[in-house]
Image (cartoon, rainbow, N blue to C red):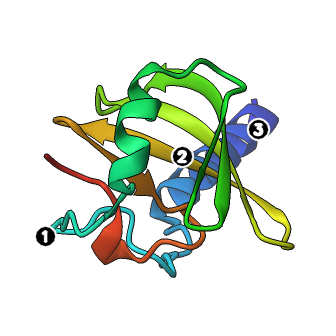
């Protein structure tokens, strides 16, 4: 009986100490949500607007010294029509990107690691 009381007291103490423990507070280095969203995105050039609407996956388009190879088409979480792009500038490495259509205009979406919070696409 004495051991049962000790076990009960120890269990109660452990339970109460667990409730009193406060976890470490963590702060993010980047905000996940920005209060005022801005849409100062870079529109694709006028010569690319129509081909982005019609060309299939794998097609290549050249404009201003950059060759864009179209990848997979998909609908973003915001409901926008998007196309993956492989960009290759004259004599430089290839870079992957995405372009999404808002209204009748295609916009180049910055990669999250390169984007600033002021040019992320948050609202339309």
Q: From the image, state whether disc 2 or disc 3 is nearer to you.
A: 2
Q: Residues within 10 Å of mark 1 (few under 14, many from 20)?
A: few
Q: Are marks 2 and 3 in contact (CB under 8 Å)?
A: no
- Looking at the image, tell me whether mark 3 or mark 1 is earlier in sequence order: 3
Q: Is residue 76 visible?
A: no
> Residue 33, position in %: x, y?
30, 62
Q: Which mark is residue 89?
A: none
- The residue that mark 1 highlights is 36
**Is 83 left, or right, of 4 in this rendering?**
left
Q: Residue at x 54, y 67 (%)?
A: 23
Cα separation, mark 3 vs mark 1, equals 64 Å
- The residue that mark 3 highlights is 2
**Is 5 left, or right, of 121 in this rendering?**
right
Q: Secondary structure at mark 1?
A: loop
> Residue 73, position in %: x, y?
54, 22
Cα separation, mark 2 vs mark 3, equals 70 Å
Q: Kindly indicate the quadrant of the structure image that contains residue 49.
A: top left
Q: Is residue 14 above or below residue 101?
A: below
Q: Residues within 10 Å of mark 2 (few under 14, many from 20)?
A: many
Q: Which mark is residue 98?
A: 2
Q: Kindly indicate the quadrant of the structure image that contains residue 109.
A: bottom left
Q: Residues within 10 Å of mark 3 (few under 14, many from 20)?
A: few
**Is 11 left, or right, of 74 in this rendering?**
right
Q: Residue at x 48, y 71 (%)?
A: 115
């Amino acid at each position: 009986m004495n051991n049962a009381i000790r076990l009960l007291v120890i269990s109660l103490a452990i339970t109460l100490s667990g409730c009193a423990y406060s976890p470490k507070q963590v702060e993010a280095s980047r905000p996940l949500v920005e209060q005022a969203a801005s849409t100062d995105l870079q529109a694709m050039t006028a010569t690319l607007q129509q081909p982005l609407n019609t060309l299939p996956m794998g097609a290549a388009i050249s404009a201003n010294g950059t060759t864009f190879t179209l990848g997979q088409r998909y609908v973003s979480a915001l409901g926008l029509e998007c196309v993956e792009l492989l960009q290759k500038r004259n004599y430089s490495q290839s870079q992957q990107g995405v372009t999404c259509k808002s209204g009748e205009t295609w916009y180049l979406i910055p990669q999250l690691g390169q984007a600033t919070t002021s040019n992320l696409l948050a609202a339309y």
